Image (tube, helix red, strand yellow):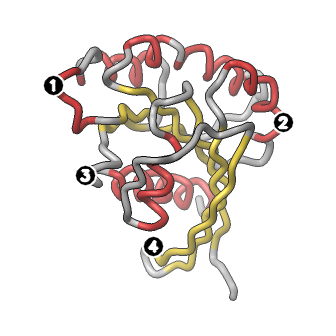
Amino acid sequence: MMYDAIFKIVIFGDGGCGKTTLLKRYISNLFMSDTKMTIGVDFETKTLTFDGMQVKLMMWDFGGEERFRFMFPNYICGAMGGILMYDITDYSSLSHAVDWLTVLNRSENTIPIVLIGGKSDLDIIREVSYKEGLKVMKDMNLHAFYECSSKTGENVEKVFNNLVECMLNLAFV
């Protein structure tokens, strides 16, 4: 099959914030509550039609445990977009977002990054307000900010569509 664009996307953030569940929801439109911790890195692909163009996404899901972080700089090479995720029920996962971006920025790779507050269906035990997430996105000069839920599917398609649109605009300018 011929593609108009092929994009590598990196999905990163602390362990347990919902990266794998987000990716599984996007790929299959199913909620998988029994995902296991990602050891190192996992990889998924998806083909879609976007604005009449055939686009292939190669999505790299990084294990968020500290012990895997050393691998991250090697795998981000060639990435065209990123999703930085934190858990709205775990304040420390947002505070570690800066650490993740520091690793990414060392690669001198200026790619559009979407900040996502995951697990928005757990609003009742929220530790991070929407305003705090939005402020971090602005302070870190990231491309966009969403809260989403892999369980309900809320905003999952929007996150990826926003990133694909941005990558297409950058690729064909």
Is residue 42 found left or right of 53 in the rendered image? right
> Quick one: label 1, few (<14), some, or many (20+) residues within 10 Å?
few
Identify which amino acid the numbered label 2 is placed on.
Answer: Asn
Total marks shown come to 4
Is residue 129 found left or right of 141 in the rendered image? left
Which tag, 2 or 1, sits closer to the chain's start? 2
Residue that badge 2 annotates: 74
> Helix, strand, or loop for circle 3?
loop
**Residue 23 percent coordinates (x, y):** 50, 53
Write the residue at 53% across / 14% down. Answer: 96
Identify which amino acid the numbered label 1 is placed on.
Answer: Ile
Which tag, 4 or 1, sits closer to the chain's start? 4
Q: Nearer the viewer, residue 114 or 64?
A: 64
Which tag, 2 or 4, sits closer to the chain's start? 4
Mark toward the viewer: 2 or 1: 1
Identify which amino acid the numbered label 3 is placed on.
Answer: Thr
Distance (Cα) linking label 4 and label 1 = 35 Å
Residue that badge 3 annotates: 152
The dot on residue 49 is none
